[in-house]
Image: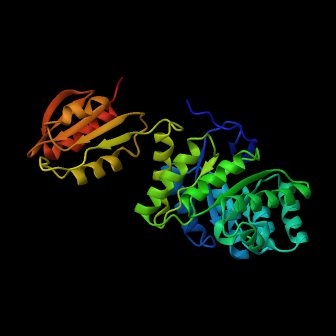
């Protein structure tokens, strides 16, 4: 049984992280935050898919002010992503942001960072201290002879110490790198040195395929050690894919229950149906069915029933026809065109 590190409890809007609470799934909008309608529509779509915390870019004062209207129309906590301009952070807080993401190092003078801290303290919202391998301070690059896990940790803890010195400890820490093993090492180091909650992700992970592989390995290694309180799978693509991947990573590690898990076999010379298309259709179909089940999609009737024994329900294709299987037992034989509707009907009326 995985033992999760018990970190400090932090409130983000209506949600709580740390203290052994479930690891929350986060994503980021790619709309212009100033476009309230488009941003709200995307947040609602992501929330329906399983996103539990959403981050929005705040590059302009108009975007900061838009948060007020966005907040009225969405139910999940909204995090404002700030770079460089402390006034945008203060405005975002005043317009209802549930958390602020800043890198104190690029905010500027101490009094500017203090202004952000004072605004956050007044509203009682957390600040996420974000350190990225691409923006590590030059003195730390020189000290460690390059960008290293040790340098990332020293940077993050130094910025945390700065905020603590300003009288604020309502903090979340994020240290990200596109180097997977460096990122893993950095999380191991910082977890041993602080009790603040950690937001975990592999930054600039890449496109759907490479990004998912790098994120799965990195997040898997980190989370399996009990480290991490929120996660984001950063992908160059539709944010919905980030949420789907994050859910699957958490389920695979046993950190999340619920939702249908689809397992399917690889194609081979015995496959007589469009297994790839069928498996994708099944995965899309079950996304809105709130059952904690395993569904198998098998490509042939030779091994299908046996391979599907560990699943609650499954289908196995043949030549123009297929089988509906329940816990390894064949329920009925059906024409290929009726497999998907029969599976959905079975799931909608599922009884233990």
Q: Is residue 128 left or right of residue 344?
A: right
Q: How is the image coloured?
A: rainbow
Q: Position of residue 113 (x, y in %)?
A: 85, 67
Q: Is residue 279 visible?
A: yes
Q: Is residue 282 left or right of residue 98?
A: left
Quarter holding residue 95: bottom right
Q: Residue at x 76, y 62 (%)?
A: 155
Camera-nearest residue between 229 and 135: 135
| Quadrant of the image containing the N terminus | top right
Q: Position of residue 287 (x, y in %)?
A: 40, 46
**197 up-or-down from 108: above or below:** above
Q: Position of residue 272 (x, y in %)?
A: 11, 49
Q: Position of residue 49 (x, y in %)?
A: 48, 51
Camera-nearest residue between 76 and 55: 55
Instruction: Farthest residue to the left: give it.
Output: 319
**330 up-or-down from 283: above or below:** above
Q: Is residue 218 left or right of residue 335?
A: right
Quarter holding residue 62: bottom right
Q: Is residue 97 left or right of residue 307?
A: right
| Quadrant of the image containing the C terminus | top left
Q: Residue at x 29, y 32 (%)?
A: 313
Q: Residue at x 60, y 43 (%)?
A: 23
């Amino acid at each position: 049984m995985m033992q999760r590190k018990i970190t400090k409890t932090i409130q983000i809007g209506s949600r709580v992280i740390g203290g052994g609470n479930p690891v929350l799934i986060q994503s980021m909008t790619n709309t212009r935050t100033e476009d309230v309608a488009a941003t709200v529509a995307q947040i609602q779509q992501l929330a329906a898919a399983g996103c539990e915390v959403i981050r929005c870019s705040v590059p302009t004062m108009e975007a900061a002010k838009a948060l007020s209207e966005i907040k009225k129309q969405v139910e999940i906590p909204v995090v404002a992503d700030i770079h460089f301009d402390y006034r945008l952070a203060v405005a975002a807080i005043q317009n209802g942001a549930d958390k602020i993401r800043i890198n104190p190092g690029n905010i500027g003078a101490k009094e500017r960072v203090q202004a952000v801290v004072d605004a956050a303290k007044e509203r009682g919202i957390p600040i996420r201290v974000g350190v990225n391998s691409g923006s590590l301070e030059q003195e730390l690059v020189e000290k460690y002879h390059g960008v290293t896990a040790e340098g990332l940790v020293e940077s993050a803890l130094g910025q945390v110490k700065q905020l603590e010195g300003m009288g604020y400890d309502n903090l979340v820490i994020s240290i990200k790198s596109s180097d997977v093993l460096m990122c893993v090492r950095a999380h191991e180091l910082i977890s041993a040195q602080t009790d603040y909650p950690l937001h975990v992700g592999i930054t600039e992970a890449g496109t759907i395929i490479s990004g998912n592989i790098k994120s799965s390995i990195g997040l898997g290694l980190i989370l399996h050690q009990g480290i991490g309180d929120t996660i984001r799978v950063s992908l160059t693509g539709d944010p919905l894919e980030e949420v789907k991947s994050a859910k699957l990573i958490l389920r695979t590690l046993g950190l999340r229950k619920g939702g249908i898990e689809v397992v399917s076999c690889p194609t081979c010379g015995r496959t007589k149906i469009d297994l790839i298309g069928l498996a994708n259709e099944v995965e899309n179909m079950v996304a809105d069915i709130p059952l904690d089940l395993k569904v198998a999609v098998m490509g042939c009737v030779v091994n299908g029933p046996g391979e599907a024994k560990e699943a609650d329900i499954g289908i196995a294709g043949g030549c123009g026809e297929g089988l509906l299987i329940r816990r390894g037992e064949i329920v009925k034989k059906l024409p290929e065109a009726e497999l998907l509707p029969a599976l959905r009907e079975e799931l909608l009326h599922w009884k233990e």
